[in-house]
Image: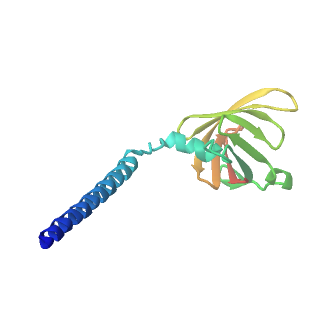
Amino acid sequence: MQRMGISILAYFIQEDYLNKMRLKHTISFMLFSSIIAIIGCTKTVPKTPLEFQKELLAGTSAYLNTQRTWQLDSFYVDGINFPLTALQKGYKKTYSYDGLYSDSEMNTGIWEIQTLGKLKQTIIYKTTNKQDSSVYDIVFINAARLNLNIKLSNGKLGTYSFKISN
């Protein structure tokens, strides 16, 4: 009888242990499934080339990335280097993610890229308070360099090369 009592007790202990193990496996499986579901449902929508070009020019609007300042590095006319003065080498353009523009000569304005590779700038000159618009071809842009082409008033091709300043 005593042996049967021990067997029954061992059976209940073993059954309790098995139930606890099933519960642990069930909780582990549910936790693992939840993590996989969260990771699997998090989707990053890729940026269009146009959006990416705008972010390279002016920032993403994320914390501390709301504008980019570009400093003039070189200037070419029809492919021939045009030496810059010290003052010209200090010239900077700042593009804000919200479409605002300013430069180191205190001019302000707006900018937009509606077509990939075309930068339209509308400038209000501080000294005359007159407004002017120009459309540049974005020849090259990355996180450190910006090259812009524009047809000059004499019909020649002007190429401005900027380096990131901020």
In the image shown, does 13 or 92 lie closer to the viewer? 13
Could you tell me which residue is drawn at 24 percent across and 65 percent down? 13
Front residue of 120/85: it is: 120
Q: Residue at x 76, y 38 (%)?
A: 102
Question: In what quadrant of the picture does the N terminus appear?
Answer: bottom left
- Residue at 56% x, 44% y: name it: 53
Between 58 and 32, the one lying in front of the other is 32
In the displayed structure, 132 sits above or below 84; it is above
Left/right placement of residue 52 relative to residue 36 reads right
Q: Position of residue 166 (x, y in %)?
A: 72, 53
Q: Position of residue 9 (x, y in %)?
A: 20, 66
The reply to whether residue 57 is in sight is yes
Answer with left or right where residue 130 lies relative to residue 95. right
Locate residue 15: give its quadrant: bottom left
Q: Outermost residue, bottom direction?
A: 3
Residue 115 in the image: x percent, y percent?
53, 35
Considering only vertical position in the picture, is 17 above or below 26? below
From this view, report whether residue 98 is shown above or below residue 89: above
Question: Where residue 49 appears, x then y in whole percent?
Answer: 49, 43
Q: Residue at x 84, y 54 (%)?
A: 85
Q: Looking at the image, which is closer to me, 103 or 23?
A: 23
